[in-house]
Image (tube, grey):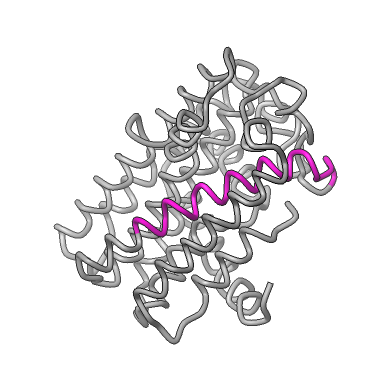
Amino acid sequence: MTDELKHFMNIEIPKVEKHMYDLVEGIDAPQSLKEPMIYSLKAGGKRVRPLFVLAVLDHFHVQSEAGYTAASAVEMIHTYSLIHDDLPSMDNDDFRRGKPTNHKVFGEAHATLAGDALNTLPFGILARLKDVPAETKIELIQLLSETAGAEGMVGGQVLDMEGEQRLLNLEELVRVHENKTGAILRFSIEAGAILAGATKEQREILVEYAYHIGLAFQIKDDILDIEGTTEELGKTAGKDEASDKSTYPALLTLEGAKQKLQDHATKAHECLMKIPSSSKYLSDLTDYIVHRNK
């Protein structure tokens, strides 16, 4: 990680987190619901998705308070998906980010409802954005609905579960992760472009960038599941291999997966070169995703 990216993270992550926690604490809801919501939001994580929103804005040299709301919205969606993924009916995990999973602390019912609340709140906070044109808010809400729902992340999760019953080919695996992992990253990147007032051509380039970065992110996760430890990852290591799950290393070998990771990283960088900027945060985030150890 470059010093510049570390500085960016040290400044922006606390701002996003404070904004996000304040949004949850400010809703008129039972404390018994807000507590498990906040618990999982505060469980840590890389905050890559909100950072992409802010990095795109910086790429276009645009400062926008709405960026922190969009960044909070995508992190809430990501967190709800983790709460539900960990439930006994899904992946049945006991730990997430090194802490007991939500349902282990608050019970299945409250964990499920906390996830439901974190799934719906983002649409409301985007609708209430101040000093943002109505058509822009509608566009953000539509994009989040598409990338987080049946056409994106949720649809990808279904394909992933169905794929556990057989060995997927590479094309099928790409489709799973283009939706399950890549779609929500696409929201982060495209939301930043929308708020920055990017041109249609620039947005199309960034959507292509998001495609490559989403697949790179998942391939790296698959590699870390083999090479990382439970302590490093904050979740059970080796689970994919033990369950014979279709992964990039399983289909391409570990070395083949590493080459595919580098291919997507190279293409992501090539996309950024088509939109020159003095800001290096998007480029640095790309390298961070490729070289991270958890």
Seen at 69% across and 61% down, the residue is 291
State the quadrant of the N terminus.
bottom right
Q: Residue 220 at x, y = what percent?
A: 65, 48
Indicate yes or no whether the magenta region holds residue 161: no
Name which quarter of the figure residue 70 lies in.
bottom left
Which is nearer the eye, 137 or 7?
Answer: 7
In this figure, what is the number of numbered marks?
A: 0
Given residues 259 and 287, the one toward you in this image is 259
- The spot of residue 160 in percent (x, y) is 52, 25
Query: Residue 123 placed where, x, y %?
Result: 32, 45
Instruction: Identify which residue is drawn at 36% across, 56% down.
Output: 208
Which stretch appears magenta? Answer: 207-231
In the picture, measured across the screen, residue 292 lies left or right of residue 63, that is right
Q: Is residue 75 above or below residue 251?
A: below
Residue at the spot 43% in from the left edge and 63% down from the top edge: 53
* Above or below: residue 45 compared with residue 108: below
The secondary structure that dominates the magenta segment is: helix
In the image shown, does 68 or 237 lie closer to the viewer?
237
Q: Is residue 72 above or below residue 238?
A: below
Q: Is residue 294 above or below residue 86?
A: below
245 vs 233, left or right, is left
The residue lying at 58 percent from left, 29 percent from top is: 85
Horizontal relation, residue 171 to residue 8: left or right: left
Q: Splitting the image into 4 quarters, where does residue 108 fall?
A: top right
Q: Position of residue 294 (x, y in %)?
A: 73, 51
